[in-house]
Amino acid sequence: MSHNRLVRLVWGMADDNSMTDGPATHGSVTQRRELAALILAESERNGAGNGTRLPTERQLAVDLGVSRAAIRHAMTVLQAEGRVSREVGRGTFLRRPAVAGPGEAPVPDSAAASAGVPDAAAGLAESDDYAPADVMAVRRLFEPTAMSLVVAWATARDFAEMQRCLRGGERAADHDEFEVWDAALHRSIIAATRSPLLIRLYAEVERARHGRVWGDLKRRSASAARRDEYRRDHEEIVTALRLRDADRATAAMRAHLARVSGHLLGSG
């Protein structure tokens, strides 16, 4: 079966040009994640391992029958999840997920942590979509209180991952790229609690962020000025965590989520 046909079967897109070079939005969040998974699967099928340089965006676009913009967004997902690294002037390379060091709890796989089980995000049907108000209510209940666990258990590797996500958010060229890094940062913070149950609970929040209702509302409320506000919030949260200041980190996360809620729902 050809790559093009496989892509269209995965997405049910035999007559849909939403991932080609038309004026569309480079596919839905679910489509971008499916394309990212397909790139990984095809690389592994071809024998690529850790450190292998991937084909160029142009070549991947030709091989998979999608636009270069779609490939670029899928690569952003993979980079945020720690599956690839981009090196200026050299290319994009496959990377294995982080492995815990001696005496550390296992580091959750980024893709699995974001969905609870592999490819769970792709299985989130529109009928299962969560209301954004419900998502924000739950986030405001448990993300701030999780900061004390991060302060207690986060390692140097955790802080390095948070810093990587902050820098990715700074470089994001548009709303969709910023959202990928935003999700990766919050995921890395929750992963640093070293609580398997909390990580799994947060995976359901991640599923909600892959839903169409959330994505459409977030996109309508987005602006460059608001992204800058979120970047400053993120910097404050991570700074407080690195200082092991639980009260400051809790207050910073609470203020950040109140800001997001206000922008999304008109509530503080």
Image: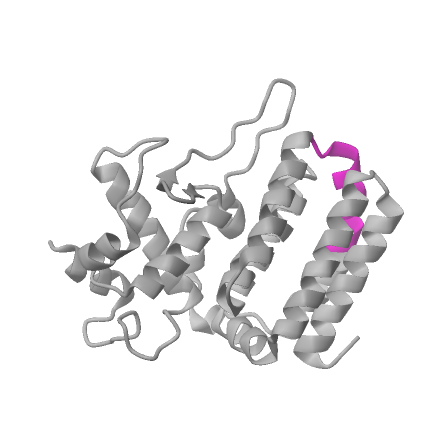
Residue name at image x 77 percent, y 56 percent: 253
**Residue 204 visible, this orientation:** no
Assess whether residue 153 is covered by the magenta stretch: yes
Left or right: where does residue 34 sit relative to residue 174? Answer: left
Q: Position of residue 39 (x, y in %)?
A: 30, 49
Q: In this view, does 130 lie to the left or right of 59?
A: right
Q: Taken as a whole, is the magenta stretch helix, strand or loop?
A: helix
The magenta span reads: 143-155
Q: Residue at x 37, y 39 (%)?
A: 93
Count of marks overlaid on the render: 0
- Classify residue 144 by image quadrant: bottom right
Above or below, 104 against 175 in this view is above
Quarter assignment of residue 220 = bottom right
Camera-side residue of 2 and 174: 174
Residue 217 belongs to magenta span:
no
| Image quadrant containing the N terminus | bottom left
Q: In which quarter of the image is residue 54?
A: top left
For residue 157, side relative to residue 250 (left or right): left
Q: In the rendered view, would you say 210 is above or below 165?
A: below
Residue 75 appears in the rendering: yes
Is the image coloured rainbow, by chain, by secondary structure, or in one colour? one colour
Quarter of the picture containing the C terminus is: bottom right
Q: Which residue, as the protein is rendered here, is positioned at the far right?
A: 247
At 36% from the left edge and 53% from the top edge, which residue is drawn?
36
